Image (tube, rainbow, N blue to C red):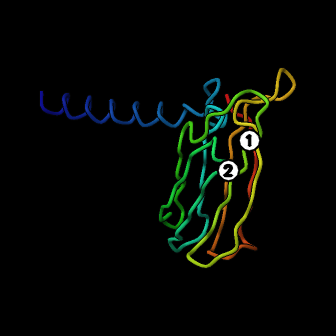
Amino acid sequence: MYRRRYLGTIGGCVGAASLSGCTAVLPGADQEPEYPGGTLLIENTGDRPVRVSIETKLDQYDASLDIDVAGGEMIVRRDFVTADQGDIVTLEAQLGKTGDHLRFQFLPAGGGPDYPPEVAQLTFETAVEASASWTALRGS
């Protein structure tokens, strides 16, 4: 009786483990996560934490963030900036306390049928400007 329960438990665990490994073959499993337009992604691909300050450059878009990003971490701020369709928003980032300011323009709400909403992604490895880059990704 105990042997049957033991074997049943092991079989259930092995079956669950094998199914969890197969989720990659399900439709949509390999797709990038979708974020709404105006979302801000900050990714530190390095090993050390970095202080990041980001703000909008126009008064009508009042959004700012001042945060430490740990090494290997990605910070997601959904709907960081909301704007009307066709409005270009300029973000400015500073890595560390004394780093240069990196500017970036994107369309949080898109610009019509040919220009979908965009997500702003800042990726860096260290607190040096040369190791940071902005990218516009397609939003939902």
Quadrant of the image occupied by residue 107: top right
Secondary structure of the residue carrying numbered label 2: strand
Q: Using the image as rendered, state which of residue 4 and residue 23 is in the foreground.
A: 23
Tag of residue 137: 1
Residue shown at the point (54%, 72%) measured from the top left: 47
Quickly name the residue at label 2: 121
Query: Which part of the image, by quadrant, shows the C terminus?
Result: top right
- In the picture, measured across the screen, residue 83 lies left or right of residue 79, that is right
Relative to 58, residue 27 above or below:
above
Q: Residue furthest left?
A: 1
Q: Amino acid at mark 2?
A: Gln
Circles 2 and 1, Cβ within 8 Å, touching? The answer is yes
Q: Using the image as rendered, state which of residue 84 and residue 4 is in the foreground.
A: 84
Q: Using the image as rendered, state which of residue 46 and residue 28 is in the foreground.
A: 46
- In the picture, measured across the screen, residue 29 lies left or right of residue 77, that is right
Q: Amino acid at mark 1?
A: Leu
- In the picture, measured across the screen, residue 74 lies left or right of residue 6, that is right
Q: Residue furthest top?
A: 113
Tag of residue 4: none
